[in-house]
Amino acid sequence: MLAVLRLGHRVGRDVRITTHICLAARAMGADKVFLSGEKDESIIKSIGGVVKRWGGKFEVEYRKDWRSVMKSWKGKTVHLTMYGEPLNDRIGVLRKEKDLLVIVGAEKVPSEVYKNADFNVSVSGQPHSEVAALAVFLDRFFEGKELEKRFPKAKLRIVPQAHGKQIDANV
């Protein structure tokens, strides 16, 4: 199980970024996103619709208290931060973990997250988006295999081609 914990979602301010975190997590191989902060049914419903149409087993679960998610997690926790250890130095160790909780922030991340995470990992020592950090992390974690993943029970699928757009609705 690889899950993502989105810290501190704010309705009205973070809807687009949080939605993109969920979309990237799903497309790039994660099993679940825990959404903490303000409850936002629109995101949960929207991502549920994506799963229904595009397939796969993926869910978004609201948990007001992110601390309870971290405390109850049975595997290791990885906080993606620009201040952590380089991803390339840690990815080999992380791939060996059975259950991984990947934590991405929204508003200022509490120091408690840094202290309690098993790993603080940096995708880059430069300012960047949490969506980009998550996508790069998942790509490295799954070694690019997630890019060929087939989603069971899909009703729609993109037909790869050099030009134009084609969606197969007869999956």
Image (spheres, rainbow, N blue to C red):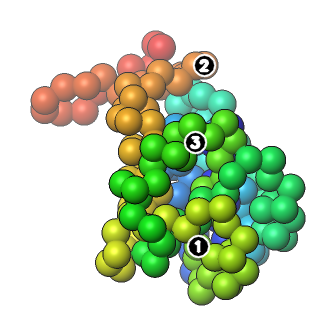
Q: Is residue 16 visible?
A: no
**What residue sits 67% from the left and 85% below the top?**
111
Q: Amino acid at mark 3?
A: Ala
Residue 149 place in picture, x, y as percent: 45, 25
Look at the picture and state if 46 lies above or below 36: above
Q: Amino acid at mark 2?
A: Lys
Mark 1 neighbour density, 10 Å: few (under 14) some (14–19) many (20 or more): many
Where does the image place residue 91, in percent across and percent down from the top left? 45, 49
Q: CA distance from mark 2 to mark 1?
A: 31 Å
Residue 48 quadrant:
top right
Q: Which mark is residue 105?
A: 1
Residues under numbered marks 3 and 2 in contact, where contact means CB atoms less than 8 Å apart: no
Furthest residue to the left?
Answer: 163
> In the displayed structure, does residue 48 sit left or right of residue 130?
right
- Where residue 41 sits: x, y (%)? 75, 60
> In the image, which disc is placed on residue 153?
2
Q: Secondary structure at mark 3?
A: loop
* Residue hosting label 3: 30
Q: How many marks?
A: 3
Give the class, few, some or many, for how many residues have Cα within 10 Å of label 3's Cα (few <14, many ≥20). Answer: many
- The front one of 30 and 116 is 116
The mark nearer the N terminus, 3 or 2, is 3
Say which of marks 3 and 2 sits in front.
3
Quarter residue 119 falls in: bottom right
